[in-house]
Image (cartoon, helix red, strand yellow):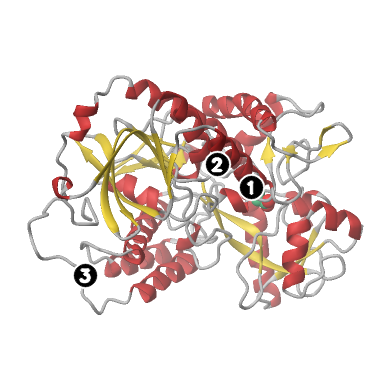
Amino acid sequence: MSRRYIVRFDSAKLPKIETDFLVIGSGSAGLRAAIEANQHGDVVLMTKSVLKESNTRYAQGGIAVAMSKEDTIAFHVEDTLKAGVGLCDQTAVGVMVEEGIQRVLEMIQWGANFDKEGDTLGFTMEAAHQRRRIVHRGDATGQETTDVLVRHLKSQDGVKVIEHAFAIDLMTQDDTCYGVIALIEDTLYCVFAKAVILATGGLGRIYQCTSNPNVATGDGFAAAWRAGCEMMDMEFVQFHPTTLFLIDAPHYLISEALRGEGGVLINSRGELFMGKYHEMADLAPRDVVSRAVLNEMQLTGALCVYLDVTHLKPDFIRNRFPTIYQTCQHYGIDITTDVIPVRSGAHFMMGGVRTNLNAETNIRGLYACGEVACTGVHGANRLASNSLLECIVFGTRAAKAAIEYARTIRKEDYTRMRIRSDDAASAHQTAPQEFDLHAAQESIRETMWQNAGILRNERDLNATVDKLETLDLNCYWNSIEAFEFQNMLNVAKLIADAAIVRTESRGAHYREDFPERDDTQWKQHIVVRRSAPRLF
Ligand code: SIN
């Protein structure tokens, strides 16, 4: 079994930081949780990079919320459940959709400048929604969300923000969390807290092609798993069908909202193709579109397909999608006249740390929210633009539950703890000098993309597990690159293992050797703990 801690430490010998609430991660879930908790005690918010860097910042589409005249909570719940293909937790979906309205209104009160049509909010459309229900700020809703939450956080006194702080491992004893061991600048610290809120975001960077920023290496998933958290639905990784495909350019997200506004996919022969694959054509669910894109690439022998919006009014494109327009322009593509080369990329993790409706995990004092959590709202496939909604709803809930828990904890209960890595005294088990971390990370990305991506089968998944096992040195590490490598390895293995077990196709998990959905055997979740797989 992999080791419990990936860094050697002894809390008695390290500098300490103490707080009531420790929030790890500065995406919308972490920021929203910190804002809530700050009214009830000292808050430390740690972030791996800088405060405004996170997956949230890159969200383009918007926030799905049932606020338009034509929409209802029931419709939004229905679409979310349908997208999740039988694996959503209906109560959690109800909570997200209902409370989401209040959370969005609150953000507007805090200054969010969402696009309007006349005097009222404007709603856009994305795949698998039966109504226009996505509030947005042009095509940069994530940036607007981040800006508003950061501004609000800063307007409150008290939250101590620590940037460039890498949370390596959660410190636990007897299934209770007491804080984290973190590398801040170049020093190892023990950060003790009455309650810890894990909001570390996603893991797209374990795949070669991804819309996610560099920080998304799955650190929170891996640390939670090592700490003994129950991990649920790890086989369900969503691939976004349209990321920019240009040699030497990042896989920049090309929002589904472009198709929501009338954009269409064509193959390298200039043929429309989505009508062949689904009755909703270009607005089919993301897994269907991603597989269709791959199939068309194979049929035509091309390296990508194209998104065509040239039939839309140029002014509309420039005003509604200014960021995409400018980014493509930067790479020499004028999207008002040229088609956009695209292919699929890893985008969002549906699974994660299993939580209840209050974002509580099975570890006392540890809460999880946002992409790292599996609240049950996404099931086997996330409905577009439900992610920011989930973040602000369950970020708030996590803080509320943490506040209640913290009332029961005395400072001495955790500051007196002495926690150390299992064999802190032994001198062996450090990584060999010659181990090439960069090549090892690349190897994970490549094997996950080739074998555990959009199309999966038993042979390739087994090969993935074998490959990952050869890379696992099961030793202590001492650099950020190494911690990230170990985290990527841990989460890649969790995904591949769960993908092997689920012998059916459902939502984002597609098995070529089991192409049908199997409700008799598989309308259930796969949950694992460090040494104990379980189905329920
Ligand atoms: C997009 O804008 O296409 C992505 C939105 C999302 O992932 O929900």
Cα–Cα span, label 2 and label 1: 8 Å
Which amino acid, by three-letter code, is at mark 3? Ala
- Give whichever of 329, 164 is nearer the camera: 164
Q: Mark 1 points at which residue?
A: 142
N-term-proximal mark, 3 vs 2: 2
Please provide percent x and percent y for residue 42.
Answer: 38, 31
**In the image, what residue occupies the spot 26% across and 54% down?**
188
- Give whichever of 263, 139 is nearer the camera: 139
Mark 1, Cα crowd under 10 Å, few <14 / some 14-19 / many 20+, is many
Please provide percent x and percent y for residue 321.
Answer: 78, 55
Please provide percent x and percent y for residue 516.
Answer: 55, 49
Q: Give the structural element (helix, strand or loop) at label 2.
A: helix
Determine whether 34 is above or below 183 in the image: above
Cα–Cα span, label 1 and label 3: 39 Å
Which amino acid, by three-letter code, is at mark 2? Ser
Q: Name the residue under label 2.
A: 28
Does residue 521 appear in the picture of this structure?
no
Examine the image and state in which quarter residue 489 appears. Answer: bottom left
Determine whether 298 is above or below 509 in the image: below
Q: Residue 431 carries which label?
A: 3
N-term-proximal mark, 2 vs 1: 2
N-term-proximal mark, 1 vs 3: 1
**In the image, what residue occupies the spot 66% across and 27% down?**
101
